[in-house]
Amino acid sequence: MNLKQLSQMLGLSQTTVSRALNGYPEVNHETRERVLRAVRETGYRPNKAAQRLATGKAGSIGLVMPTAPGHSFDVHFGEFLAGLGEEALRHDFHFVLMPAEPDDEVAALRRLAISGNVDALFIAYLRGNDPRLEMLRSLSIPFVVHGRSLGAETDYPYLDIDNEGAFYNATKLLLLLGHKRFALMNGPAQYDFAIRRKNGVIAALSEHGLTLEESCISHTLMTDEEGTLAMERFLQLADRPTAILCSSTVLSLGAIRAVNQAGLKLGEDISLIAHDDVLPLLKPENFSVPLTTTRSSLRLAGARIAERLIGSLNNLGPYPEQELWKTELIVRASTGVAPAD
């Protein structure tokens, strides 16, 4: 079915149908819903090239993908992209991925923005004073940020979770259980989420006159191998920690391996809380000792960012400019009363 046939079936002009499909505000809600219902029922797919000529829209969301020998992506970003992709598919939007060297992201974003191949951009893995923000604000293309950037102006659209609050609350739970020796397995030190999670732990400990020793902090890629190495190092300390906070269930997988190899019992000798991004292949309730977690879905975050970008392009808003999601603290068996000294 083509546009002419669809418009004849609906008894509407081709212009009205086209405008309804492309979110023009002068098409009333009832007509738009009628057109969209017919599209779903008939399986009509607009001609992208013709649609772009008629509307000036590419029907695409763009992102820059850092890539280089030795540079690796992880399951967390893949889960976020899955949510973004599911929502984009619902609206017949595409992705445009531009590979770039890690130190060329700002220039690559600019090239992608002015290429005409995308209608909107998003960026993730924000760093402190992230230089990408200033560049994006200087352009006319819509964008949404996944995360925030400490030290940068806050006048940009974002979706983030309350990383500081999540790890503050997790630390408070462990303090209530009597723990005094803490360690933090964190993501790379330059990332905003890692900075805020560390700040949350430090803030909770300071209220009890405790500190987070540098020897009890690791900043690594969030892989199970790094989790094992970090936990082995913590367990070799003279005053080994009894309470561990992990920035990912993937890190905790390796951490628990080290605990088991040392002949210690999770939830008794060592208590552990991990952040759960709701990864489908790594469910905390299915660990041999179910994990206590702070939980927020990366897939839902990806879908929400796509919804905001595409909805704004199609005049379906209004949407909030900035969203800060709270996490859930879910208590399971990996946390217990601090062992007697």
Image (cartoon, rainbow, N blue to C red):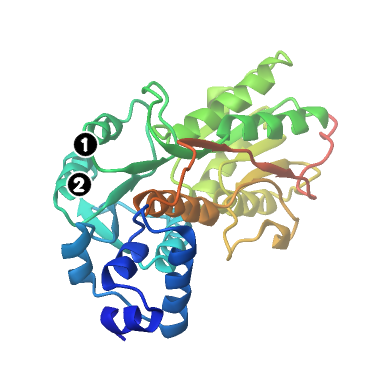
Residue 236 in sight in this render = no
* Residue in view at x 38 percent, y 58 percent: 27
Q: Which of 51 and 139 is in front in this view?
A: 51
- Quadrant holding the C terminus: top right
Residue 71 in sight in this render = yes
43 left or right of 278 in image: left
Residue type at numbered disc 1:
Leu
277 left or right of 67 in image: right
Gap in angstroms between the C-alphas marked 1 and 2 = 8 Å
* Residue in view at x 56 percent, y 24 percent: 199
Is disc 1 in contact with disc 2, using a CB cutoff of under 8 Å? yes
| Residue to which mark 2 is pinned | 113
Residue 221's image quarter?
A: top left
Residue 198's image quarter?
A: top right
What secondary structure is found at the residue carrying circle 2?
A: helix
Residue 218 versus residue 64 in the image, above or below: above
Could you say where residue 16 lies in the image, as x and y percent from the top left? Answer: 32, 66
| Residue to which mark 1 is pinned | 139
* Residue in view at x 48 percent, y 66 percent: 33
Residue type at numbered disc 2:
Ala
Nearer the N terminus, badge 1 or badge 2? 2
Could you say where residue 310 lies in the image, as x and y percent from the top left? Answer: 38, 54
What secondary structure is found at the residue carrying circle 1?
A: loop
**Callout count:** 2
- Quadrant holding the N terminus: bottom left
Q: Which of 284 and 320 is in front in this view?
A: 320
Query: Which disc, if any, is residue 10?
Result: none
* Residue at the top extreme, as displayed: 209
332 left or right of 36 in image: right
Crowding at dot 1, Cα within 10 Å, few <14 / some 14-19 / many 20+, comes out as few
